[in-house]
Amino acid sequence: MHIVVCIKQVPDSAQIRVHPVTNTIMRQGVPTIINPYDLFSLEEAMRWRDKLGGEVTVLTMGPPSAADSLRKALTYGADRAVLLTDRFFAGSDTLATSYALSAALAKIGEAFGAPDIVFTGKQTIDGDTAQVGPGIAKRLDLKQLTYVSRIVDVDLTSRSIVAERRAEGGVQVLMTQLPALVTMLEGTNEIRRGSLDDALRAARADVVVWSAADAGISDLQKCGLRGSPTVVKRVFAPPPRSEKAELVETHGRAPAESADALIDIIFARAPGVEADLAKSVSGF
Amino acid sequence: MSNAPASPQAGGGRASMKKELPERFKSYRHVWVFVELERGHVHSVSWELMGEGRKLADKLGVELAAVVMGGVDAGVREAAQESFAYGADVAYVVENPVLADYRNETYSKALTDLVNTHKPEILLLGATTLGRDLAGSVATTLLTGLTADCTELDVDADKSLAATRPTFGGSLLCTIYTLNFRPQMATVRPRVMQMPRRQDGRDGRIVPFDVDLREDDIITKLLRFVPDRDSNKSNLAYADIVVSGGMGLQSAENYQLVRQLASVLGAEYGCSRPLVQKGWVPAERQIGQTGKTIRPKLYIAAGISGAIQHRVGVDGADMIVAINTDRNAPIFDFAHLGIVTDAVRFLPALTEAFRKRLSPHSKDRLAG
Ligand SMILES: Cc1cc2nc3c(=O)[nH]c(=O)nc-3n(C[C@H](O)[C@H](O)[C@H](O)COP(=O)(O)OP(=O)(O)OC[C@H]3O[C@@H](n4cnc5c(N)ncnc54)[C@H](O)[C@@H]3O)c2cc1C
Ligand SMILES: Nc1ncnc2c1ncn2[C@@H]1O[C@H](COP(=O)(O)O)[C@@H](O)[C@H]1O
């Protein structure tokens, strides 16, 4: 079985600072991480590989430095890493990103065997759109299973996959055909540490690096800024909350008294809450 | 890279690429809202969007349409009728047995066909699991722009949709346009927009639409649906009141204090990430960037420092109350109310005080 996991290198948002004057992201020195959602997909991919045999390829589109994330994925136990990098990709929105990644996935299919499952993360923490996965599925005509909480079964003989998918108000148990695109829900598993062997292998491994041309992309109009129908016109910092929290006095008060004081303020400032609570209690 | 602005300069460069709208898109008019109907129930985000869509349609001087699809006799007509009460002028209704349950294959085909036939200029969907699943497929098929998780929608002087959304985990906002493509698509999370007032008796036109879909042609099958009430799943995202705890609670046992307060308030309970990592609380209760986004009317955070990854999950709360021993904890920068005290001692007092307030005459029953 061949599984491809799309991972994205993202700035660690814990460390992001916004320049107070220019409102630009101060990227210098901001460490990068693998998009945390992608790790749930990577772990799931490796579990099915371990179960059914085969290989896991990780794919990312990004600057040359994104190779770091791929190498990290190799230390976790991925088998092969592909970096799609080209200045033509700069400024891609979700449509252009899904275009480039689909092209790379098709090329991966030619070079290393057609993927049975393509995983993406549920969403990224920087783009945060959850749209690249569905976009790839549409472009490659893969059956789409998003927000999966559990893959119940993968049957390579009948080429079917059964998965539990989080829907509004419940869980759908869906069966569809491979090849499929899956996005895993957060918290469904935990990324393994990776063995010492994996670490040694990762250190020696070559990351496959493809340019747009290498990936067979001839239509550069569909890439990057030009291929992006959306245009970012304005970037600005959210207006800061004008005042800090109003603090309830605790000095010389027993907890019960402070609690009463706190409830008074809550009810005064949010009368709706008091009404709701009164209603729900009388409904017992 | 997706939708992440490199810099405002780059943004300016893109905006200046603006040309006149291609001829084939000039006939695209009106504002549409996709009405999410699942199991006979309309998701409230659809009506929130209807309120927003009404404002956009009025600014543009066009009609507001609801798109309702579902199985036969599955409440489609009723939902269409209800959409008029929330502001729609027209409702496109698509009824077909294959649409009884949401599946990407069937819904994206139906919605794409409808868009290609009736050509809206703006199409709004809820950023729910259904809406996000559907919007990404439809936008890619139509090769148009999609701005996800908007927090503000407006029309510009030149009548294009200005969609504002947070980026980089909420540390920045950006306003995004879909200049030369139609429809302009956007999704909005539940609870971001205000619920419009219902105007009963308001009427509109129903326009039926047929899609060519037969069960035999559809590969994805729904084997089972397990509703949440049967599986004891949390309903955090939609809860009106959420009580949550962080590392300041110091132990798994102390987390019970959070659950007790939640129980007295009829609230949902949540936590910060370390509690999940320690295995004290199940993952589905985690609030924040890698957990749930919540928009309650009241959020009570006990022993949570308020790291940015936590903050982005709760910023939409109407009122945030923080309990923390450290008066300099970042949570006091965005909480509305705070109390500098030991949560382990304070939570039982607060629970008791609420208990008394809420049922002054029935102490016995509640105590028992
Ligand atoms: C990629 C990434 C994603 C993340 N996603 C999330 C996420 O989705 N959600 C999330 O919550 N975190 C997330 N985090 C973690 C986040 O950065 C913080 O580490 C986490 O939120 C801290 O949790 P905490 O506030 O409970 O703990 P701490 O930071 O340890 O804070 C404990 C707080 O309790 C206070 N305290 C101590 N004793 C008491 C007492 N007796 N009574 C009252 N207060 C007391 C302290 O003053 C302190 O403010 C993420 C991190 C990364 C890198
Ligand atoms: N540049 C990229 N390279 C590889 N995968 C990506 C890239 N951008 C997005 N993805 C994948 O698509 C998922 C959803 O991204 P997004 O639509 O930005 O929220 C991510 O979790 C990744 O798996």
Image (cartoon, rainbow, N blue to C red):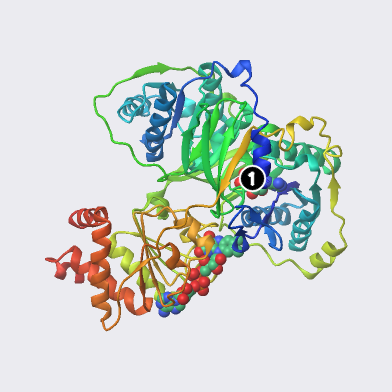
User: Viewed as shown, does residue A215 lie left or right of B122?
Assistant: right
Tell me: residue B185, above or below residue B326. above
Asked whether residue B33 is in view, the answer is: yes
Residue at figure coordinates x 48%, y 63% from the top left: B282
**Residue B273 can be seen, yes or no:** no
Residue under circle 1?
A: B8
Which quadrant is home to the C terminus of chain A?
bottom left
Residue placed at 68% from the left, 42% from the top?
Answer: B10
Other-residue count near label 1 (Cα within 10 Å), few / some / many at <14 / 14–19 / ≥20: some
Can you give x and y, in whole percent of width and height, for residue A200 in the image? 84, 67
Specify the amino acid type for callout 1. Answer: Pro
Nearest the eye: A257 or B281: A257
x, y percent for residue A121: 63, 49
> A228 or A241: nearer the eye?
A241
Identify the chain of the residue marked 1, using the numbered disc in the image: B
Residue at the spot 43% in from the left edge and 58% down from the top edge? A241
Residue A70 appears at what percent x and percent y?
77, 56
Judge left or right: residue A129 versus residue A142. Answer: left
